[in-house]
Amino acid sequence: MKRYEDLSPSLRCIMTPGPVEVDPRVLRAMSFPVLGQFDPEFTQMMNETMEMLRELFATRNAWAYPIDGTSRAGIEAVMVSLILPGERVLIPIFGRFGHLLHEIAERCGAEVFVLEKPWGSVFEPEEVIAAIETFKPNVVAMVHGETSTGRVQPLAEIGRACRRMDALFIVDAVATLGGIPVETDAWMLDAVVGGTQKCLSVPSGMAPITYNDRAEAKLMSRKRVERGIRISDVQPGELSFVRSNYFDLGMLQDYWSPQRLNHHTEMTSMLYALREGLRLALEEGMDARFARHQLHEKALIAGLTAMGLELYGEPSCKLTVVTCVLIPEGLDGESVRTLLLERFGIEIASSFGPLKGKIWRIGTMGFSCRTNNVLRLLGALEAALLRHGFEVFYGLGVQAALDVYEENVR
Ligand SMILES: *Cc1c(COP(=O)(O)O)cnc(C)c1O
């Protein structure tokens, strides 16, 4: 009989744009006993998670709860529930995840209008607003922090324009929630999707979402309850009902409401993890957390540039939590990454599509975003570059980062 070894994953220093290292407190939370899904102890945890999520999303929305599945599941749930077949949807794209929104909108049967920006930059709000005025979409869907290019899109003016033109504004804040401000109410975002394995430092497997009463009104107009659990025959949304059962927010919110109308079986251990991750974020304080992400970004950039490396992309829209580095001419980027992983236990990321082989992406997210990780990475990267025959200004990278940390002792 074949024997399988004991599970023993290596301890890694994960400096990618997700998944990132998980705080030991979250790992511990995941090992606690399972509770039944209607056990009052468990439903209390569900309610506390909703409360904490409202703070993270900076919203007074009634609805803030996780979708079970990775972040993409959250995006798909929001889009399939809020986009009716045949509706007009505008998708401004400035990287890989914008293309994902396009792809999902098509699957929802929408008439999709796409705007594209060259990778490495973002939209001027006026460009998107002009397109909203031209196409008069029912829904606008857009990425906040684009991890494929390391760029961040300002959203407030676009949010205001969507409200004025009565379009629902859906935002993918998967990479930004918990790392940089995501101001759901102030920016007038109607539905927002976050991620767990990025700046919240919880394993992947859930996608926190929030949506306001404008979004809820649309859900109610398509409401349909499963036959096996209906208590009345009234089904106002029978004609335009959501084509996915698992991702139907109208049914999911009944499960997260005091009604606790059964849907799927909530992921017990993942909810423990999310609750602990949220508790950690709120204990740190959102402003302190944002400041921490900025500090380590600053130290990382100082180190990389002192070493002689160049950053990729338009600096004015750089995303704090992802730093993209141009792979020097003639260097095999994948070979450097392999050396970092195999010899130093440090993981950084490559990129996709037009940027494949051209840049490395370094994440400074959540629990991975800390001094010793940044310094370790800089030291190891210098060694790996030297090993590949690239002329670095050796010794300078780590020193430049140490300077930043010394100037910013808190
Ligand atoms: C990571 C990421 C996703 C997809 O997340 P999964 O958890 O892999 O489904 C979507 N959007 C953005 C901006 C991301 O960074």
Image: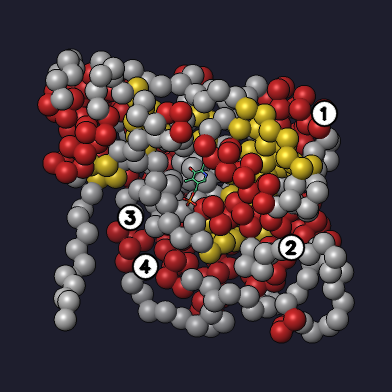
Going by the picture, which residue comes out furthest to the front?
1
C-beta proximity under 8 Å, tags 3 and 4: no
Find residue 363 and report its horizontal and vertical position in percent: 37, 37
Query: What distance separates the C-alpha of mark 2 from that of mark 1?
Result: 28 Å
Tag 1 secondary structure: helix
Find residue 370 and report its horizontal and vertical position in percent: 30, 40
Of the numbered discs 3 and 4, the one sitting upstream in the chain is: 3
Tag 4 secondary structure: helix
> Identity of the amino acid at label 2?
Val
| Residue 396 lies in quadrant | top left
Nearest the eye: 171 or 43: 171
Within 10 Å of disc 4 (Cα), the crowding (few <14, some 14-19, many 20+) is some
- Above or below, 87 against 120 in this view is below
Of the numbered discs 4 and 1, the one sitting upstream in the chain is: 4
- Above or below, 292 against 325 in this view is below
In the image, what residue occupies the spot 46% across and 81% down? Answer: 35
Q: Label for residue 29?
A: 4
Query: What distance separates the C-alpha of mark 3 from that of mark 1?
Result: 45 Å
Where does label 2 land, which residue? Answer: 242
Nearest the eye: 285 or 193: 193
Where does label 1 land, which residue? Answer: 133
> Identity of the amino acid at label 3?
Asp
Of the numbered discs 3 and 1, the one sitting upstream in the chain is: 3
In the image, what residue occupies the spot 36% across and 67% down? Answer: 29
Tag 2 secondary structure: loop
Where does label 3 land, which residue? Answer: 23
Is 10 left or right of 201, judged from the image as shown?
A: left
> Identity of the amino acid at label 4?
Ala
Query: What distance separates the C-alpha of mark 4 from that of mark 2?
Result: 34 Å
Q: Label for residue 86?
A: none
